[in-house]
Amino acid sequence: MRAIPTLKISISGVRGVVGESLTPTLLTRFAQAFGTYVGPGAIVIGRDTRTSGEMVRQAVVAGLLSSGCRVVDLDICPVPTVQLLV
């Protein structure tokens, strides 16, 4: 029997298996919904050094831009850096 991919959403972020429950389409839609919720303005993003980071970054940027947000991309940086800029 095939397992159902699980996506976990919590205060610390979105967790899933890249390519299964965590796809570029899902990430783009998630970011677009967030951008629509917060409205136009600047959104700061950053990422860690995991190999999936670039795919996640591109999907999130696409979703945020499509909802009218301006993206401030810090690229690879420590998470506290992003938290302090929010």
Image (cartoon, helix red, strand yellow):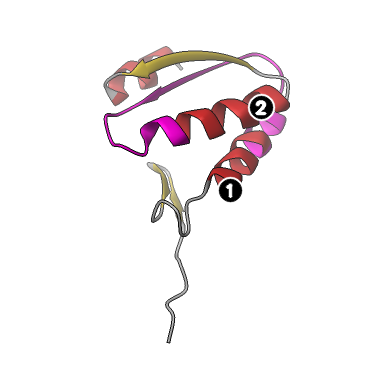
Image coords of residue 73 (percent x, y)? 47, 15
* Type of the residue with mark 1: Leu
Q: Is residue 52 left or right of residue 42?
A: left
- Quadrant, the N terminus: bottom left
Residue that appears at 60% across and 35% down: 31
Image coords of residue 62 (percent x, y)? 62, 28
Q: Is residue 3 left or right of residue 71?
A: left
Tag 2 and tag 1, C-beta contact below 8 Å: no
Dot 1: element: helix
Query: What's the magenta region?
Result: 33-55
Q: Earlier in the sequence, mark 2 or mark 1?
A: 1
Q: Residues within 10 Å of mark 2 (few under 14, many from 20)?
A: few
Q: Give the label, 2 or 1, closer to the camera.
A: 1
* Type of the residue with mark 2: Val
Residue that appears at 66% across and 27% down: 38
On residue 26, which mark appears?
1
Inspect the magenta stretch and tell me whether residue 62 lies in it: no
Inspect the magenta stretch and tell me whether residue 43 lies in it: yes
Dot 2: element: helix
Find residue 34 and report its image quarter: top right
User: Which residue in the protein does label 2 denote?
Assistant: 38
Image coords of residue 65 (percent x, y)? 66, 22
Question: Taking 81 as reference, is 36 above or below it?
Answer: below
Q: Is residue 62 left or right of residue 6?
A: right
Question: Taking 55 as reference, is 61 above or below it?
Answer: above
Find residue 8 and report its image quarter: bottom left
